[in-house]
Amino acid sequence: MSSNITNKALQIPPFIVMEVLERARVLEKQGISIVHMEVGEPDFNTPECVIRAGCMALKEGKTHYTHSQGILPLRETICEDYKKRYGVLFDPDQVIVTSGTSPALLMIFASMLDRDDEIIMTNPYYPCYANMVQFLGGKPRLIPVSPGENFHLTPEKIKPVLSGKTKAIIINSPENPTGMCMAPMIMEEIANLGVPVISDEIYHGIRYEGNDHSILEFNPSAFVVNGFSKRYAMTGWRLGYLIAPKDWIEPIRKIQQNFFISASDFAQWAGLTALKEAQEDVERMVRTYRERRDYLYPALRELGFDILRPPEGAFYLFANCQKFSNNAYEFAFNILEHAHVGITPGIDFGSMGEGYVRFSYANSLENIKEGVTRIRSYLEGQGIR
């Protein structure tokens, strides 16, 4: 029977962080306590005002299909939010509300890519970028980046690989897996290369130094992907959105109609409340993330992990572990099996992630401290610290 399964379905790579999580769940069922620092999911509950709005929407019967682009009040509020935060203007008709940011990315890629067309991205990168591009018949054009470059693209690295097959450049700031942020000057230079830019802004709002900048500040014809999962701790609500130039909206909307119909009705009303009322909750969460970062960064360096500078946003530390192992995958699973701490092997994020592991500090400070203690004991027991 498996001979009838398509190659693209058989060949799509696994998301290794989920393999770590799934093994951790097996160990937990055996009664073993695991400190989870692998998954990039806020440990906070959704803000109360958002929960109330979602419940009210359900009670009011907002449980039906909506316009395929999303309810107009939410699209208008997204426009207002971007005007307030970044001083940019666009029309609500340029917004498509989606069931999380993954469908938003998939639809943008699907509207751009014919076979063998290329999307330029960093290496290391968020794994789903490359997996989606390849699934659609395109090719990820990977550009190696280093800690000294804050793991970000530069115009000088992009220009030599531009070709007739280049359809877009994707950037992510604050970035997964590193937590680093792109300087606005570099963002502006990339925006002016004459190639469409897709900016993944899902971690906007979780920033410790400086201010977030949207690609739309530098090029109003760019594409933006954003959502509610990270900033508002709404991962399970599955709510995101994309912003696109007007002439791209109709083809993307047709893809939405055929594959997704619309985002959840009641979740959209909850998202509207998040944008309008939950900023204090966001600021509280960011203060807590900062406290965790400020503990974890020096603690890992003291253990011997090489981290050039602390992350500026999101909730990840991308740490060089070559002092301990030349196989990050094996090292991460050894940490899980023997120290009982879940971390993500860097190879999940591309070939340039080899030699690194990602720590998520979307967990309580108490648990993070326990995780560091367990890793210290493991390294000392192995005689590699």
Image: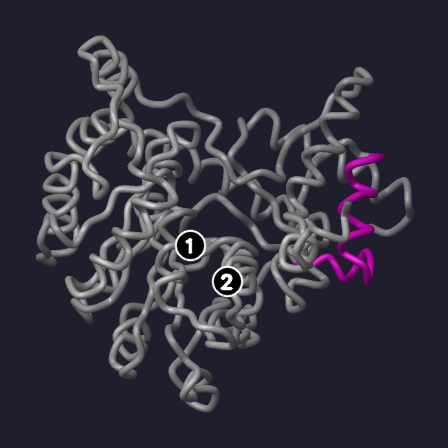
Whole-percent x, y for residue 192 in the image: 25, 80
Whole-percent x, y for residue 90 in the image: 10, 56
The residue depicted at 25 percent of the width and 74 percent of the height is 188
Q: Which residue is mark 2?
A: 136
Q: Quadrant of residue 335 in the image?
A: top right
The residue depicted at 11 percent of the width and 37 percent of the height is 72
Closer-to-camera residue (294/95): 95
Q: Quadrant of residue 113 in the image?
A: bottom left
Name the front one of labels 2 and 1: 2
Closer-to-camera residue (171/337): 171
Question: Is residue 229 depicted above or below 143 in this figure?
Answer: above
Instruction: Give SS at disc 2.
Output: loop
Decide whether residue 195 is among the magenta residues: no
**Mark 2 belongs to which amino acid?**
Leu
Q: Quadrant of residue 66 in the image?
A: top left
Q: Which residues are drawn in magenta?
A: 320-338
Q: Which residue is mark 1?
A: 106
**Mark 1 belongs to which amino acid?**
Leu
Task: Mark 1: give few (<14), some (14-19) or many (20+) Cα within 10 Å.
Answer: some
Cβ atoms at labels 2 and 1 below 8 Å apart: yes
Closer-to-camera residue (9/240): 9
Instruction: Give SS at disc 1.
Output: helix
Q: In the image, is 364 to the left or to the right of 97? A: right
Placement of the N terminus among the 4 image quadrants:
top right
Whole-percent x, y for residue 303 in the image: 72, 48
